[in-house]
Amino acid sequence: MTSGLYPGLLLLLLRILPSDETCPSVCLCVADTVSCSSTGLSKLPVPLPSFSSTLDISHNYLSWLGPGSFKRMPRLENLRMSHNQLSSLGVGVFHNASSLRHLDLSSNKLQVVEQHYFQGLWRLEELLLYNNKIAQVEAGTLIGLSSLKKVYFSLNQITDFPFFSIQDHSHPFLTMLDLSSNRMSRLPWEDVKALPRLVQRGLYLHNNSLICDCSMYSVFWHWDLRGYDTLKDFTDEHTCSVFGDQRASIRFLRHSRFFHNCSVEKAHSQPVTVLLSNVLVSEGGRVRLDCQTSLSSSTELSFTWLSPSKGYITEDSINDTLISLFPNGTLEILAAKVNDSGLYVCTAMDIKQALNATREVNVTVLLPPPESFNTGYTTLLGCVVTMIFILIYLYLTPCRCSCCKQPKPPVIPVATYDPSPLTSVFCPSARDQAKVQADKRVAFMEPMLSGEGTEWTLES
Ligand SMILES: *[C@@H]1O[C@H](CO)[C@@H](O)[C@H](O)[C@H]1NC(C)=O
Ligand SMILES: *[C@@H]1O[C@H](CO)[C@@H](O)[C@H](O)[C@H]1NC(C)=O
Ligand SMILES: *[C@@H]1O[C@H](CO)[C@@H](O)[C@H](O)[C@H]1NC(C)=O
Ligand SMILES: *[C@@H]1O[C@H](CO)[C@@H](O)[C@H](O)[C@H]1NC(C)=O
Ligand SMILES: *[C@@H]1O[C@H](CO)[C@@H](O)[C@H](O)[C@H]1NC(C)=O
Ligand SMILES: *[C@@H]1O[C@H](CO)[C@@H](O)[C@H](O)[C@H]1NC(C)=O
Ligand SMILES: *[C@@H]1O[C@H](CO)[C@@H](O)[C@H](O)[C@H]1NC(C)=O
Ligand SMILES: *[C@@H]1O[C@H](CO)[C@@H](O)[C@H](O)[C@H]1NC(C)=O
């Protein structure tokens, strides 16, 4: 039995190992990385080592990739194919390469991104397609790429893009969609406004051929209001052409005069105002956080709070007597704990009009100063001591005695020279005394304060 098994196993090993695990002669294989960059390849080298997780075939002359090109590479995570001549990809190119996380197809000659290109790449996080000749992105292209974080389409010739295919549930991690330097003139702004907030924040649209109009301006106006970096970083590259005339292009983030007739507030269906505030409260204190948002309180709103320690709080979810949520959205914490500190986010929802608005409150719960009794006691003691000193001052200071016409020379200059409010209050006659004794004083002071001495002399 055993003797029959061995040759079979050996045969299998011989068949798999040498063919799959050797490094193609033109490439460099280091640990799990295979680099065939700048080697003049016009075809994929076969076989490619199945163990590699990074494959670099950039700067070559590949013009086409056939079905299942990477099917024997189940561990492939990074595939770099920038700077080739790829103009299209065969059906199922990435079949069985579902470990891919990073795919670089930039600086090629792709013209259409077909629906099937990236099928099955549900782990893909970064997709680089910039600097191709892409004019069209088919509607289903990004469907199923649910791990996507960043997609780069800039420097192409895209005229329209399937924004509607990107949704909160389909692409929960997408934070960058670069569509800058393309040829989009009119966007489906309703679809753009419906993009998940994270995608809107990371949507690059500068250097396109946008046509100036109110619906466009209103979207950018709101993004600007929210302070998105995508706009701040490329303020001057955000241009649009007046009446579609490419020669008359304006930097619309800088010059908004053209849009004076636009009603940006009304054009936008979702109020996005986020009001920020800070609240300080001592531990055990009662705190009320109101949820005043841009939504009018005259309509029927429902409120949800997201709290750092208790998660979502709605009117129905409260079973804690220390917290209440009023119908007007105000959240009350009866006895704040240090653990209650953090960012509270209230969402006001107008269900009829499908509008949301949020308000953020940063609550800081301060511990009362430690050993508060002692502090109070010390303060009290301090007061008493101060009082005693004041009394001593009042009744025992030389000022008092000076009133009894027994002036002591050293005291008088001090009172006059530094007439602090306290001394003048306590010794109202000191000044007069000083004037009376002026000649004596000058003689006394001169050796010490030569600069002032002249003044004194002039005065007297
Ligand atoms: C793809 O992978 C599956 C399972 O991992 C395997 O059964 C199938 O044969 C592979 N297909 C190809 C074309 O290698
Ligand atoms: C703007 O896009 C054009 C191509 O559409 C490109 O040649 C140019 O370099 C881009 N400019 C900037 C500043 O990105
Ligand atoms: C704005 O409206 C005024 C009057 O309604 C009109 O004269 C003007 O041309 C409009 N401006 C633009 C840029 O459309
Ligand atoms: C509130 O109710 C949830 C379940 O509905 C329970 O898990 C939680 O412990 C309750 N909290 C308090 C403070 O009673
Ligand atoms: C909401 O209602 C509570 C209780 O009636 C009240 O104390 C609070 O001031 C109200 N908040 C606002 C913003 O009107
Ligand atoms: C704060 O929370 C931690 C764990 O959640 C708990 O161990 C601690 O006792 C809490 N502190 C206060 C002051 O409630
Ligand atoms: C408003 O917020 C709720 C809860 O967070 C969410 O389910 C809903 O889709 C949001 N509606 C809009 C129009 O954003
Ligand atoms: C909230 O306020 C505290 C103290 O002022 C600060 O340290 C913290 O960074 C703030 N948090 C946020 C999210 O603004």
Image (cartoon, rainbow, N blue to C red):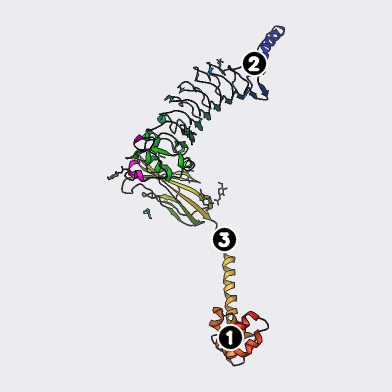
Give the distance between the C-alpha atoms of the residues marked 1 and 3, in whole angstroms: 56 Å
Mark seen at residue 442 = none
- Image quadrant, ligand 5: bottom left
Which residue position holds label 3? 369
Q: Which residues are magenta?
A: 241-268
Residue 374 quadrant: bottom right
Under mark 3, the amino acid is: Pro
Residue count near mark 2 (Cα–Cα under 10 Å), binned few <14, some 14–19, many ≥20? some
Q: Earlier in the sequence, mark 2 or mark 3?
A: 2
* Closer to the eye: label 2 or 3: 2
Residue 437 quadrant: bottom right
Q: Is residue 385 magenta?
A: no
Q: Is residue 266 magenta?
A: yes
Which residue position holds label 1? 458
Residue count near mark 3 (Cα–Cα under 10 Å), binned few <14, some 14–19, many ≥20? few
From what the image shows, is residue 323 above or below residue 135? Answer: below
Locate residue 241, reporting x and y percent.
38, 37
Disc 2 under 8 Å from ligand 1? The reply is no
Residue 233 appears in the rendering? yes
Q: Earlier in the sequence, mark 1 or mark 3?
A: 3
Secondary structure category for the residue under label 3 = loop
Which residue is most to the front? 247
Is 250 on the left-hand or right-hand side of 124? left
Which residue position holds label 2? 20
Secondary structure category for the residue under label 1 = helix
Q: Quadrant of the N terminus?
A: top right
Under mark 1, the amino acid is: Leu
* Closer to the eye: label 1 or 3: 1
In the foreground, 451 or 295: 451
Residue at image x 59%, y 62%?
371
